Amino acid sequence: MDIQDADAEVRGRFSPADKLGLEGPGGAFEEVSVVLEVRSPASVERVRQLVAHAERGCHSSQSLRAAVPVRLHVRVNGDDLEL
């Protein structure tokens, strides 16, 4: 499929309270929005199919939709740091 140009704008909304040591929600995103602009001579239906296929295969967006455990392991000068 011919795509002449594509541009994505990604925005996230979150509370900075946790970063500042204030009471409030944690620092996780409350919402992430993506605006994808596509220029293509292909039909709207073909673009729709491509975007749906890409969305299903996107590890980032799929991970943001589910609770994913995050583990931090820190090494200082080769030695494990207990947190």
Image (tube, helix red, strand yellow):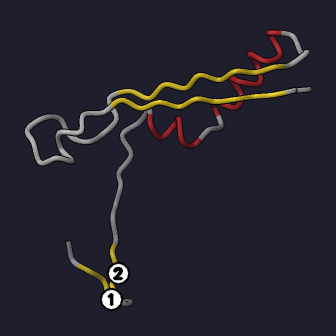
Residue 12 at x, y = what percent?
41, 32
Residue 75 tag number:
2
Residue shown at the point (26%, 80%) measured from the top left: 81
Q: Where is residue 41, by image quadrant?
A: top right
Left or right: 50 as drawn, with respect to 10: right
**Which kind of residue does numbered mark 1 sit on?**
Asp
Label 1 to label 2, Cα distance in Å? Answer: 5 Å
Where 66 falls versus 83 (above or below)? above
* Disc 2 crowd, CA 10 A, few/some/many (<14, 14-19, 20+): few
Horizontal relation, residue 83 to residue 34: left or right: left
Tell which of 79 and 21 is nearer to you: 21
Percent x, y for residue 71?
34, 61
20 versus 52 height, above or below: below
Instruction: Please give the label number shown on residue 79.
Output: 1
Mark 1 residue crowding within 10 angstroms, few (<14) / some (14–19) / many (20+):
few
The residue lying toward the viewer, choosing from 31 and 61, is 31
